[in-house]
Image (cartoon, rainbow, N blue to C red):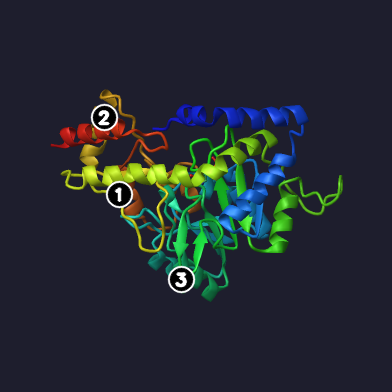
Amino acid sequence: MVDLNGQYRKIQPEVDAAMRQVLEQSDFIRGQAVADFEQALAEYTRSRHVVTCASGTDALQLALMALELQPGDEVITVPFTFVSTVEVIALLGLRPVFVDVCPDTFNMDVTKIEAAITERTKAILPVHLFGQCADMEAVLQIAHRHHLYVIEDACQALGAQVTFSDGSLLQAGTMGHIGCTSFFPTKNLGCYGDGGAVFTQDDTLAARIRSMANHGMSQKYYYDQVGINSRLDTLQAAVLQVKLPRLGTYITARQQAAHYYQEALADCPGVELPSTTPFSTHTYHQYTIRLAPALRDVVKQKLAEADIPTMVYYPCPLHQQAAYRHLAPWQEAFPVSESLAKRVLSLPMHTELTPEQLQYITSTLRSILS
Ligand SMILES: *Cc1c(COP(=O)(O)O)cnc(C)c1O
């Protein structure tokens, strides 16, 4: 599915030197590389503020904490996502209110948002799933109309860009009040452990998030608010500093692999390919096809027998999970998410895929389905 070692080999001298420098300086926590990386990422994303933290999950938690939501407040999000999105809502005693996703983009169906808004709704939390942004212009308009916060889960979409109808171009994570991303090794910009970051254009929110990620500390050993311990290690920041200038190249490599899949599978019987939208670029964190439910697991098995790994992201939507179904017992079914869970299959997608590998994957898949 991924080739992290192959990617490392190509940048090994630079990464090793950057890590060695941290070892020499021994500024392991809140070191120079962290501040330098935050500035570089702010420039790359044209975000006023970037606050790094220990993971994408923590970034989402910090976002909700910073907005001072109260237990019982409702956050509108999707059931077809990685667990973190909903986990942090539940951890803080907030209530996830789900809206279904679109069958072809896998992203929040914005036509369903307004029906989900109640007196207690405080925020909308769209997920930019598989590397393509949700319809943020619509989300922001609805949020504005109902005085709601917008938190973007951009963990899979760092580097994706949205074009708005006024022609402005904004990066994933920088459109809402707060945006969150992850540097988990397999993400678009991955470090060599856990890491994450929060984006905001608001000075007050930025200061609060920065303090909250460091125990709610104002000055040393004085605490203004309850915080958490969530910092990006200096060693990880050093790795990310080497990789950030290559993010554009990495995304292009993913897009080229996706283009190959698109061409080679265009007329493959029984396969539905992922859709793109006119408003967002696609960074192809995943390349996810849809198959008939009866075929999906058979195809997965046959590909595995041919040494081709695939993954099902995600096999069970969150409103049906044991940990979360009690949070929303009154909620209706989410037929698109439930259907996708039975039909999706993500093909190998990373920066090191060769034309030979792509040819082998697509011809094998075609022969299985013919
Ligand atoms: C990876 C991911 C997260 C969590 O990021 P971690 O760094 O693993 O904590 C949250 N949401 C989505 C959609 C993700 O893909």
- The amino acid on which the numbered mark 1 sits, given as a three-letter code, is Ser
Mark sitting earlier along the chain (3/2): 3
Identify the secondary structure beneath mark 2: helix
- The amino acid on which the numbered mark 3 sits, given as a three-letter code, is Gly
Residue drawn where x is 77% and y is 34% of the image: 27
Q: Which mark is residue 303?
A: 2
- The amino acid on which the numbered mark 2 sits, given as a three-letter code, is Leu
Q: Nearer the viewer, mark 3 or mark 2?
A: 3
Residue 290 locus on image (x, y percent): 27, 45
Distance (Cα) linking label 3 and label 2: 43 Å
Identify the secondary structure beneath mark 1: helix
The quarter in which the N terminus is drawn is top left
Mark sitting earlier along the chain (1/2): 2
Distance (Cα) linking label 1 and label 2: 22 Å
Ligand 1 within 8 Å of disc 3? The answer is no
Distance (Cα) linking label 1 and label 3: 35 Å
**Mark 1: few/some/many CA within 10 Å (<14, 14-19, 20+):** some
Image quadrant where residue 65 sits: bottom right
The quarter in which the C terminus is drawn is top left
Identify the secondary structure beneath mark 3: loop
Count of numbered circles on the image: 3
Proximity of marks 1 and 3: CB atoms separated by less than 8 Å: no
**Mark 2: few/some/many CA within 10 Å (<14, 14-19, 20+):** some
Residue on which disc 3 sits: 167
Q: Is 49 situated left or right of 124 in this image? A: right
Residue on which disc 1 sits: 339
Q: Is 122 situated left or right of 204 in this image? A: left
